[in-house]
C-alpha cells in the first residue's frame, strides 16, 4: 500500500539569491553539491534528468520563478509513486540567503518511516554541501565522482577505511586532515564517525557515505578519479573477516 510523506528543511547560505539559484536550477550547479550528472531545461514545463548509470530519474518543472521559486515532480510510477521537490529562495541582508526546501511524494509499499528518516538525514548533508559550494566554490563547475565500495566488508570496516585515508577514526568537525592516498589536504566540515565524513579541500568537497560509497564534487581535473576511488575502496575494504 502506498503512502504520502513530507520532509521540510530550512538553511541559511552565505551567498546571494542569484548564486543559490544557479546552484539549484542549472545542471552544472546541481552536480556541484548533489548527485549528478543532471540536465535542466530551465522553464515552466521543462524537463530535468538525473543519470547515475545505475539509476535514472526524469522530472517536469512545475514552478519556475528565477531567483525565487523552483519546483519539479518526477514521472509517476505505475503504482502512482513519485517524488516532488520545492525550493523557496529569500535574500537577506549582508549577502546571505534563506533556502526553504520541501520534499514530498508517495512511497511504495515497504518504504516506510526508516526510509523517510534516512532521506531527511541525507538532505541535511546535501543542503549543508550546497552551502559549502556557494560559500567556497560558487561559479565553479564541479564534477560528481561516485564510487561504490564492496558490498561484503570486514567487521572493522570503518577503522580500516579511516586508517587507509589517514584520518582519525574519531575525527571531529574542524579537524585538519590529509587524505593521504590522494594527496588531498583539507578540513573536516561535516560528519559523524562511522556514519559520514565530509572533507573540504582546495579543489573539492569530498563526501564518504560511511563505508558504502563516496560521492565527491571535484573542481579540477577529475579524469580517472572514479576508477581510482573504486580501487582504493576495494583495497581498503574488500576482504571481509
Image (tube, helix red, strand yellow):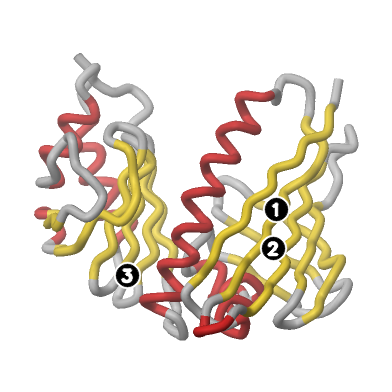
Instruction: Give residue 224's position: percent from left, percent from top.
Output: 29, 64
Q: Residues within 10 Å of mark 3 (few under 14, many from 20)?
A: some
Instruction: Name the residue beneath numbered marker 1.
Output: 57
Instruction: Name the residue beneath numbered marker 2.
Output: 49
User: Which residue is rendered at x = 76% and y = 69% of the image?
Assistant: 70
Q: Residues within 10 Å of mark 1 (few under 14, many from 20)?
A: few
Task: Please report whichever mark, 1 or 2, sits nearer to the chain's N-terminal start.
Answer: 2
Estimate the spatial distance between the alpha carbons at disc 2 and disc 3, rounded to whole Å. Answer: 22 Å
Position of 202 compared to 152: left or right? left
Position of 24 compared to 169: left or right? right
Q: Residue furthest top?
A: 241
Instruction: Give residue 136's position: percent from left, percent from top.
Output: 36, 76
Q: Quadrant of residue 85?
A: bottom right
Q: Quadrant of residue 30?
A: bottom right
Task: Please report whichever mark, 1 or 3, sits nearer to the chain's N-terminal start.
Answer: 1
Viewer-side residue, 40 vs 197: 197
Amino acid at each position: 500500500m502506498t503512502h504520502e510523506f513530507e520532509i521540510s528543511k530550512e538553511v541559511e547560505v552565505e551567498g546571494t539569491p542569484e548564486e543559490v539559484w544557479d546552484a539549484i536550477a542549472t545542471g552544472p550547479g546541481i552536480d556541484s553539491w548533489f548527485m549528478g550528472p543532471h540536465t535542466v531545461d530551465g522553464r515552466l514545463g521543462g524537463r530535468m534528468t538525473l543519470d547515475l548509470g545505475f539509476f535514472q530519474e526524469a522530472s517536469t518543472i512545475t514552478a519556475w520563478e528565477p531567483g525565487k521559486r523552483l519546483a519539479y515532480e518526477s514521472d509517476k510510477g505505475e503504482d502512482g509513486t513519485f517524488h516532488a521537490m520545492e525550493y523557496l529562495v529569500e535574500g537577506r541582508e549582508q549577502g546571505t540567503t534563506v533556502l526553504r526546501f520541501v520534499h514530498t511524494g508517495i512511497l511504495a509499499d515497504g518504504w516506510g518511516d526508516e526510509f523517510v528518516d534516512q532521506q531527511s538525514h541525507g538532505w541535511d548533508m546535501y543542503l549543508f554541501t550546497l552551502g559549502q559550494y556557494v560559500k567556497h566554490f560558487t561559479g565553479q563547475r564541479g564534477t560528481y565522482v561516485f564510487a561504490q565500495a564492496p558490498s561484503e566488508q570486514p567487521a572493522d570496516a570503518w577503522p580500516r577505511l579511516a586508517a587507509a585515508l589517514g584520518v582519525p577514526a574519531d575525527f571531529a568537525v574542524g579537524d585538519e586532515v590529509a587524505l593521504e592516498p590522494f594527496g588531498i589536504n583539507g578540513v573536516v566540515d561535516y560528519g559523524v564517525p562511522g556514519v559520514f565524513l565530509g572533507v573540504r579541500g582546495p579543489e573539492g568537497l569530498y563526501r564518504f557515505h560511511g563505508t558504502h560509497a563516496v560521492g565527491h564534487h571535484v573542481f579540477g581535473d577529475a579524469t580517472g578519479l572514479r576508477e581510482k576511488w573504486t580501487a582504493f575502496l576495494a583495497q581498503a575494504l574488500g576482504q571481509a573477516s
